Image: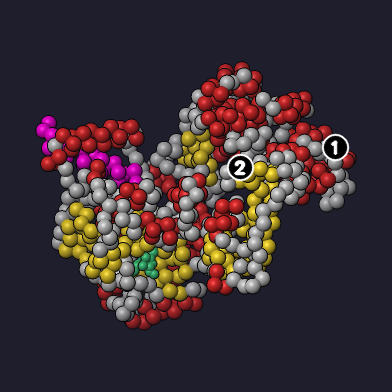
């Protein structure tokens, strides 16, 4: 094969794979194979520089930063949307549309999440990406071609054969939550400025002069309309246009749906609003569009927005409030966290009266003082954050935030450990002890129901527990009659504690609360060493042979195993009857699901979600929370929703509870 041929073939393969991976979430090549093809293409292109083309997958980041962002005039102005804030507003919109069209019956609307990112226009000539631009004022934007080229969900070259001569595509570039979190985590580690919210982070990323910086930001783009099109006939409906775009290589939002009439719009809204916390990216409302393009044409535009579309906004996720005072909380590891007590404010659908201020660096970065007016943000199920201070509203009585010089709970000396202020009291500190007992009892650990914050504090104050091992000595007679505890709940608690004695090594390891050992690491350690005894004998090097265990985690584990106090607690727990299947049974037991990745969704009759997860793990499976093409199977119960839908779309086997019961009985377990 000639070099030219091979290069063309490699580009085609890589583009296809890129599309499957980023746009369809359905990769078909293993990553190593993709890397191999990529390297081969790079090698050939280095050998034959004259064959390098702009739309080659190797050319996503240009060599030189641009000097400035140049103005761009949009081919067709990028309009904005009319907003409504409640159901009446939506009904008004539907009525006006039908009146204008003279239609009595229900219209078909396409419902799309209103992504909270940055509107971007992409121009393709003969199928090749020529220009990317921000919306700007709608008529003129800025040229960000060098940056959009780095976004993997944006094709450099359209897929397929019958391509339009000219195509302008519009959509939203946004930063999913995980990307946002990791970006800010990095920024905090480097003591750099953190981003206030994912939209600001996306906007900042797109306006970089150096595309190398943008390439490091995990941006995505979902397309929602076309601007100018030449040399192609578009279908009759907006929903079909989106399908076209998808076939040409663009990502379309998976939640998009066509509904009948205003009632359909309303139930879509309810459905999506309820799932807003789980989407993984910010949306600030729903966009409803008349699906028929002929009707869209008949309706036309006002000067600033189309008459055929409307956005129904969700309640705001940011609000102003006052910071009343700052308290310091001591966590399980002794970290002392400043917590802002706020004037209660309704934000992101809940009333918020506390927000974490993280640490000293964050307080300094915000420049916040007590009494300040602050912007509070609550997005998804993320804990509320103070994102900025409205400094021109500062009053004369504002006060400096002073960090404690000794532990606010046990008065032990504190230690500054990088950004974190830490109490040195260990389990002498009532706060650390309380948090470790709560952790020990938590669902993913020993799974003891009924040991919440108040109960643990009460038992500690009465001197009934001074370590986790004491839990196993509690008696129903002692508990019954304690404040807020009847005979029945006393028995239930003692039963739950007794029940937890039969556990698994991963749960036990996690329950011990070794710094940086989460459920996955605990599972890895247990799987690798098989028994407590083998783990105890492991050297630092041997510990690092476990997947995801690096020098830091290994050191924490070793330090824990070398601590006489910790080993004393472990011994007491084992003496109290805490046990797990021994290494021998583990080695001889079949793990029929070894190597498989499962997802559990919906409600089951015989198991809680946690129990089902534990059962699957017991059979050797890894259980994760989201469905991807790498998922081996989905265990679906009643009212399973989007995960089940996604599994079906991807053709992943779906199992019911009966199948799990059968697997378990085949193991002779239950
Ligand atoms: S349609 C002429 N669809 O909302 C139609 N816009 O307030 C204009 N947006 O600037 C846009 N998700 O940045 C449309 N599914 C969606 C959208 C969406 C987010 C943004 C877009 C636009 C703004 C208008």
Residue 20 versus residue 556: which sits nearer the camera? 556
Q: Quadrant of ligand 1?
A: bottom left
Q: Position of residue 409 (x, y in %)?
A: 75, 48
Q: Secondary structure at mark 2?
A: strand
Disc 1 designates what residue?
475
Indicate whether residue 10 is drawn in magenta: yes
x 31%, y 63%: residue: 134
x 66%, y 43%: residue: 415
Looking at the rendering, the stretch of residues picked out in magenta corresponds to: 1-22
State the image quarter where residue 521 is shown: top right
Q: Position of residue 41 (x, y in %)?
A: 21, 36
Indicate whether residue 74 is drawn in magenta: no
Q: Secondary structure at mark 1?
A: loop
Mark 1, Cα crowd under 10 Å, few <14 / some 14-19 / many 20+, is: some
State the image quarter where residue 460 is shown: top right
Q: Is residue 619 visible?
A: no
Residue 296 versus residue 3: which sits nearer the camera? 3
x 21%, y 34%: residue: 43
Residue 494 horizontal side relative to residue 171, left or right: right
In whole angstroms, how far apart are the C-alphas of marks 2 and 1? 41 Å
Q: Which mark is residue 417?
A: 2
Looking at the image, do the residues carrying marks 2 and 1 touch, with CB atoms under 8 Å apart?
no
Residue 559 horizontal side relative to residue 633, left or right: right
């Amino acid at each position: 094969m000639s070099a030219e041929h091979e290069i063309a073939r490699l580009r085609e393969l890589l583009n296809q794979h890129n599309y499957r991976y980023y746009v369809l979430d359905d990769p078909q090549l293993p990553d190593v194979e993709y890397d191999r093809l990529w390297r081969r293409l790079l090698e050939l292109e280095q050998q034959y520089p004259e064959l390098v083309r702009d739309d080659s997958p190797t050319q996503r980041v240009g060599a030189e930063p641009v000097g400035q962002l140049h103005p761009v005039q949009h081919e067709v102005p990028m309009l904005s949307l009319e907003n409504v804030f409640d159901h009446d507003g939506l009904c008004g919109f539907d009525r006006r549309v039908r009146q204008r069209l003279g239609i009595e019956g229900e219209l078909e609307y396409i419902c799309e999440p209103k992504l909270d990112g940055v509107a971007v226009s992409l121009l393709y000539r003969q199928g090749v990406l020529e220009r990317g631009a921000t919306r700007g004022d709608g008529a003129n934007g800025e040229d960000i071609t060098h940056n959009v080229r780095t976004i993997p969900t944006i094709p450099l070259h359209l897929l397929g054969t019958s391509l339009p001569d000219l195509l302008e595509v519009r959509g939203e570039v946004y930063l999913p939550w995980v990307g946002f979190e990791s970006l800010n985590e990095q920024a905090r580690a480097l003591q750099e400025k953190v981003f206030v919210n994912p939209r600001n982070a996306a906007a900042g990323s797109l306006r970089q002069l150096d595309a190398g910086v943008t390439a490091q930001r995990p941006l995505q783009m979902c397309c929602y309309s076309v601007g100018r099109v030449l040399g192609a006939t578009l279908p009759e409906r907006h929903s079909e246009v989106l399908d076209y775009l998808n076939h040409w290589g663009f990502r379309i939002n998976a939640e998009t749906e066509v509904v009948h009439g205003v009632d359909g719009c309303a139930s879509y809204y309810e459905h999506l609003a309820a799932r807003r916390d789980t989407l993984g990216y910010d949306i600030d409302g729903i966009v409803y569009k008349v699906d028929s393009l002929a009707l869209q044409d008949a309706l036309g535009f006002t000067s600033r927005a189309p008459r055929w579309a409307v956005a129904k906004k969700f309640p705001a996720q940011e609000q102003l409030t006052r910071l009343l005072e700052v308290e310091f909380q001591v966590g399980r590891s002794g970290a002392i966290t400043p917590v802002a007590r706020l004037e209660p404010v309704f934000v992101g659908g809940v009333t918020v009266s506390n927000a974490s201020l993280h640490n000293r660096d964050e307080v300094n970065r915000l420049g916040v003082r007590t009494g300040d007016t602050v912007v509070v943000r609550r997005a998804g199920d993320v804990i509320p954050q103070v994102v900025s201070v409205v400094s021109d509203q500062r009053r004369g009585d504002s006060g400096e935030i002073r960090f404690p010089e000794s532990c606010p709970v046990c008065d032990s000396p504190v230690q500054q450990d990088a950004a974190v202020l830490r109490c040195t009291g260990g389990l002498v500190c009532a706060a650390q002890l309380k948090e470790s007992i709560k952790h020990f009892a938590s669902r993913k650990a020993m799974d003891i129901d009924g040991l919440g914050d108040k109960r643990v504090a009460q038992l500690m104050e009465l001197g009934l527990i001074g370590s986790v091992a004491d839990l196993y000595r509690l008696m129903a007679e002692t508990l019954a009659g304690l404040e807020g505890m009847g005979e029945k709940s006393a028995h239930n608690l003692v039963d739950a504690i007794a029940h937890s004695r039969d556990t698994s090594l991963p749960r036990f390891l996690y329950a011990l609360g070794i710094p940086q050992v989460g459920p996955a690491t605990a599972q890895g350690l247990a799987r690798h060493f098989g028994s407590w005894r083998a783990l105890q004998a492991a050297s630092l090097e041997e510990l690092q042979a476990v997947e995801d265990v690096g020098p830091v985690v290994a050191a924490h584990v070793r330090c824990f195993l070398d601590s006489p106090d910790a080993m004393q607690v472990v011994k007491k727990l084992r003496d109290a009857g805490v046990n797990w299947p021994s290494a021998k049974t583990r080695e001889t037991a079949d793990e029929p699901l070894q190597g498989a990745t499962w997802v559990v969704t919906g409600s089951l009759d015989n198991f809680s979600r946690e129990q089902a997860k534990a059962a699957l793990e017991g059979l050797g499976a890894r259980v994760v929370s989201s469905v991807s093409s790498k998922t081996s199977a989905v265990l679906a119960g009643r009212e399973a929703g989007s995960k089940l839908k996604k599994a079906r779309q991807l053709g992943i086997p779906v199992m019911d509870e009966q199948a799990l019961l059968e697997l378990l009985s085949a193991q002779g377990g239950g």
